[in-house]
Image (cartoon, rainbow, N blue to C red):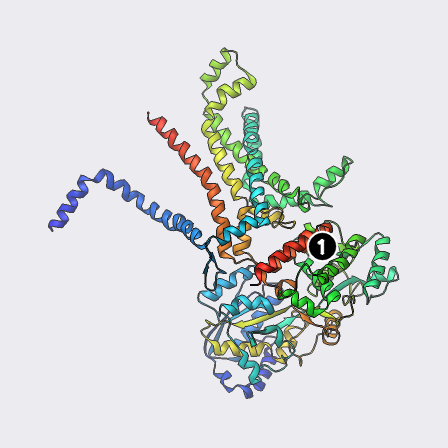
Amino acid sequence: MSAATTQRSWYQRNKMTVTPLLFLLPGVLFFVIYVISPIIQSFNISLYDWDGLGEATYIGLGNYEELLTDRAFEISLWNNVKWLALYLLAVPAGLFIALFLNQTVVGIRLYKSLFFFPFVISQVVVGLVFSWFYLPREGLLNALLTFLGLDTVNILGDPTLATYGIIAAGLWPQTAYCMILYLTGLNAVDPEQIEAGRLDGAKGVRMLWHVILPQLKPATFIAFVVTIIGALRSFDLISIMTNGGPFGSTRVLSFYMFEKALSEYGFRMGYGSAIAVVLFLIMLVFIAYFLWSMYRDEQEARR
Amino acid sequence: MFHKLTKAAAALALTTGLVTPAMAELSGTMRIISDMSNPAPRAIIEGLASDFDAMHPDLTVEVEIVDRDAWKSQIRNALTANAPDVINWYAANRMAPFVGAGLFEDISDMYENGDLPGLDSVKGALTIDGKQWGVPYTYYQWGIYYREDIFKELGLSEPTTFDEEMANCQVIIDSGRKCYSIGSKFLWTAGGWFDYMNMRTNGFDFHMKLATGEASWTSDEVRATFANWRKLIDMGAFIDDHQTYSWQEALPFVVKGEATAYLIGNFAVPHLREAGLTDDQIDFYQFPKIGDHPMGEDAPTDTFHVASGAQNKEAARAFLQYVTSVDVQTAINGPDGLAQLPVNANASVADDEFIAQGFEMLSKNATGGIAQFFDRDFPAEMASVGMEGLQEFMVFPDNLDDILNRLEAARTRIYK
């Protein structure tokens, strides 16, 4: 009985600290079980040679050494860089479309919905539509090229072009996503500041750069975050459009990891985990930067 | 409930009853997980299960059908957690990971006891380490399916040597067509071409040495294979942009007559017929001879296995025996069923132009040996690296040295 009373008084004394912790507990628990522990497990498995069925043999950093000499890994890594660099085009493109659509004319809601449409449909459908668009004989793209008197191209069958073809397909929905972020951001732009800028003689690009964009900073930040994460997660489009081919030229790290660990000819769990670890470390750079800048913003806001 | 197999089943119950009296007393539940998910095979497995269920009043048979491609990665989970009694898989090296991990039941005793009569000729494909790990239920031939009507129009006949093949091909190309359709997006079709080019150039035994890692990818033999293959590529024998198509997407080239032939398995025939080609328009011939070697053939075999973690092994074994019996084999591989080749030597082969030719070829003119297929004979990892190289070769033949060095490096790493 006495224990209960002391406990109650202890709780009463520490209510302000304990209550938020209690509320956090379920979330933290799930985060640890479903996010943190798999990450640690991946690190661990990447040190073994394991087919997922039999005994796992400890091989130290053997998988990582193999990665260094694996050309398919090198190609995947480079493709990831291409994805990262080119996918970011979605941010300015989204901004441009948002500025373009941010006006009041009849039926603007319809136009906005149409521009937003590609983001709503599934990536699988986007991939299918684009692979039909690129078809070497019947595709719309080649019909267009023939009409203009140019040579036809087989984008998805050409190892030097295929990745760009897939990124172009990915940009379509991603641009729409960035557009909607900016459209919401534009709603929050302060008209008084625009008025003030106008009185000072700013217009066009200068107005955009010095008055509008600073106010869109939160939208830009989110657009960058989702685009970078989207670029690193690119998987569905590759799987649908080329299945990693022709001869492995369109693989990215996530797809290569899937192939090595979980696909029909894979089941090298250790090797797949090693690829996952590399991908995780790359992502960690961005995640750390995002967290840091969010933390910094909050500090500033508190001041 | 009357199924078309009931009669066969009843007959079988009588015959096998003599061999294994215990069979009539099967009880409990038997779980099957099957990858026979396409419409025709699905009807077959459902029919087999319900007939087997009807034969054994005390036994409940449950079937779960998994998508055929999804099964290739799901089988691991299925076998490790709460294993079913009977499962589908493939013969030869594709069994090796499961045999090695002890997940397939050793059923050598059934072969020894004579519980599985008529399977002697296919036993080899189910053997690893001198033991048998399952039974086959169907197999099919590979070969060149071609447009008979276009051959007639051009005055060509079925070639038997590679020189004739190339001479034919030249005529076809001169007529404005391509010789071969192929869709190599998913790589394995290129594996079929390599199997045949290599088996014909160097013989079946060398091909198997390559599969088991004893022969080198940079050897003169392998180079000779690619040199022969390249002759066709340089002629422009294959359709353009094949790396963009799946094997189904490459079928219209044959249907429209833009390409005259397709090296593929017998499973392509129903698709060609559905597309409107009659049996007068399509025909089949064996891949022609190149070197002086006995002909080896690809004839992939699909199988049933007992899981080592099965709860009802007695029923599972009886089911394997049932599936491979003469009458059931005749019925399920018949024209209304899988329309493929029965595995039991005493079963009758369906009255179908292609099945009959395939049976004739495999039983009389495949003295070199029967291979399963590139991705079933080679270990999985070698197959995946290999097929990627084969596809690259078909598109950029000049990269051959680089490809072969890469495959050789993979070989030294994979076969330890």
- Residue B295 vertical placement versus B250 (above, below): below
Q: Quadrant of the C terminus of chain B?
A: bottom right
Residue projecting furthest to the bottom: B18
- For the residue pair A115 and B234, the one nearer the viewer reads as B234
**Residue shown at 48% from the left, 64% from the top:** B78
Residue A293: image quadrant is top left
- Residue A62 vertical placement versus B138 (above, below): above
- Residue A68 vertical placement versus A115 (above, below): below
- For the residue pair B393 and B14, the one nearer the viewer reads as B393
Q: Quadrant of the N terminus of chain B?
A: bottom right
Residue projecting furthest to the left: A2
- Amino acid at pointer 1: Ala
Residue labelled with disc 1: B250
Q: Is residue B296 left or right of residue A181?
A: right
- Residue A95 vertical placement versus A161 (above, below): above
- For the residue pair A75 and B3, the one nearer the viewer reads as A75
- For the residue pair A228 and B339, the one nearer the viewer reads as A228
Chain at numbered mark 1: B
Q: Where does residue A300 sit, x and y in percent of width and height?
A: 36, 26
Q: Is residue B94 left or right of residue A132?
A: left
Q: Element at badge 1?
A: loop
**Residue shown at 68% from the left, 45% from the top:** A158
Residue projecting furthest to the right: B155
